[in-house]
Amino acid sequence: MIRLLDILFAAVGLILLSPVFIFLIFVGLLDTGSPIFIQKRCGKSMRPFQLMKFRSMRLNTQAVATHLIEASEITKWGSLLRRSKLDELPQLVNVIKGDMSFVGPRPNLFGQDELIAERSDRGVYSVRPGITGLSQVKKIDMSKPKLLAVTDAEMIQNFGIKSYFKYIFLTLLGRGFGDRVIKTKV
């Protein structure tokens, strides 16, 4: 049932938001010259997949977890994209492809060894990663691997259609939260 809802909502979202996509691609071209960011992430059963986002950082930003990136790497346009969560829109394609769900643990990089160990111990990779979930609503990011893995496992254990809609609505109402970045040193 959840997979059917994912496909339906993602397809409707892509159709209805296509003018927004076109606008964001155009502005992204002006901002960095490369509006779409693609990065290999851990999916269900730790299978790799290509996560898509609108680019919010400079082109040559180091490929590490966001909480290890300095804020100065985020462009002014990227800052707006991140605050509004519009940088996440291309993940609707990941949802349709079956790489992701709307709700699930945020997909991590393969180099995040501590998080991978914590999530593996708790069975977090048994589900598709998601655009939002309990950790985002509780403002827990990947800088706290154990707490994140525990919270992800809690979400999976108590997951159902009611919580699916709850996390989506809370995120749309502004409760969702992205990974923090390092404050720029002055």
Image (cartoon, rainbow, N blue to C red):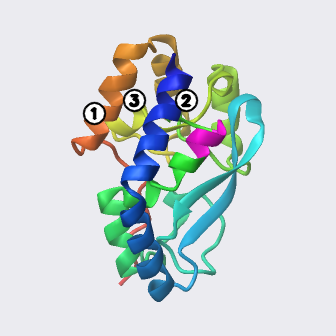
**Residue 17, percent across and down?**
38, 56
One can see residue 152 in this view: yes
Front: mark 1 or 3: 1
**Residue 22, percent across and down?**
44, 70
Mark nearer the N terminus (1 vs 3): 3
Judge the density around disc 3: few (<14), some (14-19), many (≥20) Cα neighbours within 10 Å.
many
Q: In the image, what residue occupies the spot 34% across and 24% down?
A: 165
Residue that sits furthest to the right in the current view: 47
**Location of mark 1 (residue):** 169
Q: Secondary structure at mark 3?
A: helix
Residue that sits furthest to the front in the current view: 15
Mark nearer the N terminus (1 vs 2): 2
Residue type indicated by callout 2: Ala
**Location of mark 2 (residue):** 149
Q: CA distance from mark 3 to mark 2?
A: 11 Å
Nearer to the camera, 11 or 154: 11
Front: mark 1 or 2: 1
**Residue 3, percent across and down?**
56, 24
Check whether the beta carbons of the residues at disc 3 and disc 2 lie within 8 A of each other: no
Residue 120 in the figure: left or right of residue 155: right
Disc ID at residue 134: 3
Residue 126 in the figure: left or right of residue 171: right
Q: Which residues are magenta?
A: 94-99
Residue 102 in the figure: left or right of residue 98: left
